[in-house]
Amino acid sequence: MKVVSCQWAVGSGQWAVVSCQWAVGSGQWAVWGLALLVAGCSGKADHAVEPAFYYWKSRFNINVPEREYLERADIDLLYVKFLDIDWDENRQEAVPTSMLSADTSAFLPYRIIPCVFITNRVFIRTGADQIPILARKIGYKIRDMAGKARVEEIQIDCDWTETTREAFFRFLEEIRKNAAEKSWKVSATIRLHQWKFPDRTGVPPVDKGVLMFYNTGDVADWQEPNSILNLETAGDYLDGSGKYPLHLDLALPVFHWGALFRDDRLVKLINNLDSRLLGDTSRFIKIAEGRYEVIKSTYLEGYYLYSGDRLRLENVDFRQLETIVRETGAKLDPADRRLIFYHLDSANLSVLPYESLKDLVDSAAP
């Protein structure tokens, strides 16, 4: 019997589950056994580059198209967001703002890397004496949520700065102590500015890093051509960057969204928005390639849009991904590494058909 969903509360220095729904998984052992059989016959050990996906939804529920894609691509490695952590001004402490809901038996066909996103302000506000306590809370919560999942690594995602470097690195040292009790490795995400300027931002004390090669533009600027992947801006980080003093895997975007602007200000990002939903010329008018204006107030994907609002559609294509793999190849450690795609969603798989994924993985091999 496994947890399907939980509600939680923060109190007395603990993160407690206060109510749960339960369900008995069916057929999971058979699926797991099949996945192991396929993995055992795949010959993955002969490949220098292993593909993987981020799973960044609030509920772990892989649908049929997603499962079939993973099976065909022989992918069993998923980076799954378990927790979002932010600073609570009322409580004056770091607390979870979201927590993955999952039937843990659904993890069994996959190797799971639990991921925790922590805002930078947590390390601005958390006192030095509270850092070890925070690390222990997060470490034990991950263990509890993972259940019997096959876990060999956990990942910490934080866009730290020079100001928070000392506190964040102390946290990483503490979380590694906790992870070592389970023989787990620890990785950290590396943004482009951290990659190019390690002397300023430091190199995190972890086993490995993941270079996040997306969100390279200014999403809040209406004139921005593509904030998900602006290769011109990214080129500034590629030029002059040297070998990073930590083994790095590479994360690439395969998502799309619409940036909603009102009175020249970004007000919302609408996930998975594409032009087919903007074809009604009585409500929307195309003002440029990938840009639309609302001419009649209306609802769109559950959001209310006002006349005069503007939308910028953003996505990526295979050629852009090829460029990143090619340009970063000589700058990353040639040892075995992973190519991780953000993120697994049936709405995103058209960006990266199986054949294209295989081509990218092959081209990324040293």
Image (cartoon, helix red, strand yellow):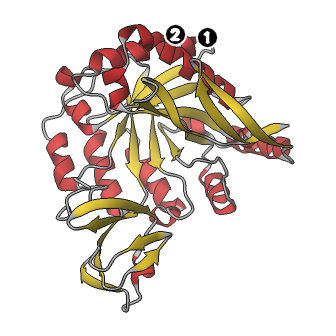
Which residue, given by chain and number where applicable, does mark 1 sit on? Answer: 181
Q: What is the x, y in percent for residue 359?
A: 44, 55
Which quadrant does the C terminus fall into? top left
Q: Would you say residue 333 is visible in this rendering?
A: no
Which residue, given by chain and number where applicable, does mark 2 sit on? Answer: 177
Query: Horizontal placement of 81 versus 328: left or right?
Result: right
Amino acid type for the residue under numbered disc 2: Lys
Asked whether disc 2 touches disc 1, contact meaning CB atoms under 8 Å apart, the reply is yes
Dot 1: element: loop
Amino acid type for the residue under numbered disc 1: Glu
Q: What is the x, y in percent for residue 152?
A: 60, 25
Q: What is the x, y in percent for residue 170?
A: 37, 12
Residue at 43% over, 58% down: 255
Query: Is disc 2 surrounded by few (<14), some (14 to 19) or many (20+) residues within 10 Å?
Result: some
Q: What is the x, y in percent for residue 227?
A: 27, 56
Residue at 76% over, 39% down: 20
Dot 2: element: helix
As measured in the structure, the alpha-carbon distance from the residue carrying label 2 to the one carrying label 1 is 7 Å
Q: Farthest residue in the front direction?
A: 90
